[in-house]
Image: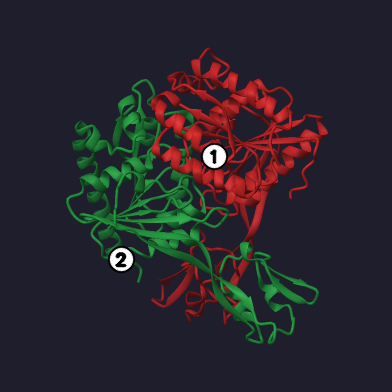
Chain colours: A green, B red
Amino acid sequence: MKIAVASGKGGTGKTTVCVNLARVATQPVTLLDCDVEEPNAHLFIACPSDEVEPASIWVPRIDEQRCDACGECSAFCAFNAIAMTASRPKVFEELCHACGGCAKVCPKGAIDEVPRPIGTVTVGRSDQLTLITGRLDIGMTMAPPLIRAVRSRADDDEQLVLIDAPPGTTCPVVTAVSGCDFVVLVTEPTPFGVHDLGLAVEALEACGIPMGVVINRSRRVEPSAATFCKRKGIPVLLELPDDRRIAEAYSRGEVLVEALPEYRAAFELLLLTIRERAANTHVSRALGDGR
Amino acid sequence: MNGADPMIKELVILSGKGGTGKTSITASIAQLGSDTVLADCDVDAADLHLILEPRTRHRETFVSGREASIRPTDCTGCGVCLDNCRFGAIEPYLDEQDEEKFRVNGLLCEGCGVCVHFCRDRAIDFEPRDCGEWFVSDSRNGTLVHARLRPGAENSGKLVAIVRAEARSIARAQHQPLVVIDGPPGIGCPAIASVTGATMALVVTEPTVSGLHDVERLLAMIRHFRIPAALCVNKWDINPILALQIEEKSRTLGAIPVGRVAYDPGVSDAQHALRAATEIDTRAGEDIRAMWDRLRVLLDGNHFEP
């Protein structure tokens, strides 16, 4: 069962929700930190025995002996990553999307693919929790291939996989949430929060994944997020109050259900609700799958 | 790198971590600074227009890249496209005659064209992709260039570059010396596109373990592109000791602390009233005013080492 935690707006509490769900789970959990530009889950979950591995994409290398400068590779590349200069191709690795097309179209077989490091994947374990963190190298632009590398570390048959998605509404988010059974959207009831929730809902509707909302920093005077959910028919799974103690505990890197145990029951209930809803998707997909 | 005009300065506001108050501070700076053109480069989830109530005077479609789509009538179900696609964008399905065919999941299609090239039946179209829109608008605090990327779309870096270039050309035409850029969260594609070639970056962070972690990565990225950086710790009184640590750490990474802004529910009240924090009487607004005075000195002079 795969559950993603996402949000349109950043800083609404994705990591808080993810980490606390992982902490209240009574069975083995794999937490995938797919916010590879700024991964934070490890700050709240100490995993002493970390294994770090480099993550790479495959970029072309041109064998100059074989290359006859026909220009097919450059003409094919949709990302302008191969330019013909002084009658020979030059590769701009930072523009390469690693589609492999140039190697396939080269009539001389002069292109092979070599790894280009873009970041790291760290695997840590503590008790029944496995934390897998993607970390994009500084100056690298492409998050999606690293997100795919992180996701490939979790098996499809694992009991519970939680995905901490990046903020936003575009390609990195889609890469992080696609194929999940359920998505939890975390928002705050401010105009910015509600506006960006709308964008995130639009993106997820296109993905066809069922969703629910957690409203963080809820103030009774601001029902806008709840009103939006009601209008869209999206369930509100949990409302966390605007409690300065929560902000302070978070600032110190403390896990909410441990720092303020009165919130534990709320997260246990949240996990139960999410699991039920995700199981429904799982079953309906199995029954209605076109294949 | 982006044809920067030396007469026009660009201040980009970034945060690494989301939700630290970038847009609230940008909206305040927009109100405090006269002679500024605004560029909302958080094209994933643009919010500045919510405060500025802009009147759009120009809009343009953002077309970028291409998207594969398989014509069901011509697909023979050979599956070559499935084998060739590295982005998991090809999905099998059964048609009405119970024959296996393939289709493209547009959300996952990278637009590389490999499937198109190798399709034996030439059954795959490859049309330019409509990725969103960008706008030029008038607001009470100056001209705003903003955009909306279609949800699930890509090439946000390219759209950021368009928004920045348009804001610069408007600043040039209107003889306004400063472009203020509201940047995206993170340190990847759109953040890099927002910062390269800018005059200075203002990093807005918060005194949390995540804020500290993220600001280190962000300052490393900004330094990588050799852009001078200033630092603002928002909601500093949530954790004063960590606020101090972040400022010290940032100094070692080359950023100049220019101010602290208090934790103040008034900021969110201002947002509800569709006003910047400096437009109503808030404690945070006073702090932002003091920070802006210092930032202005840095921007006007050459206080940075090359």
Q: Residue furthest top?
A: B281
Q: Residue B235 appears at what percent x and percent y?
A: 45, 26
Q: Is residue A14 left or right of residue B129?
A: left
Give the residue displayed 40% in from the left and 28% down from the top: B241
* Above or below A52: residue B118: below
In this rendered view, identify the residue nearer to me: B63 or B178.
B178
- Indicate which disc residue B252 carries: 1
Crowdedness near tag 2: few (<14), some (14–19) or many (≥20) residues, C-alpha within 10 Å = few
Crowdedness near tag 1: few (<14), some (14–19) or many (≥20) residues, C-alpha within 10 Å = few
Give the residue displayed 20% in from the left and 49% down from the top: A25
In this rendered view, identify the residue nearer to me: B298 or A100.
B298
Amino acid type of the residue that numbered disc 1 sits on in the rendered structure:
Thr
Chain assignment, label 1: B
| Image-quadrant location for residue B95 | bottom left
Give the residue displayed 45% in from the left and 55% down from the top: A135
* Above or below A125: residue B244: above
Amino acid type of the residue that numbered disc 2 sits on in the rendered structure:
Asp
Q: Residue A15 appears at what percent x and percent y?
A: 36, 43
- Indicate which disc residue A229 carries: none
Q: Residue A106 appears at what percent x and percent y?
A: 65, 82
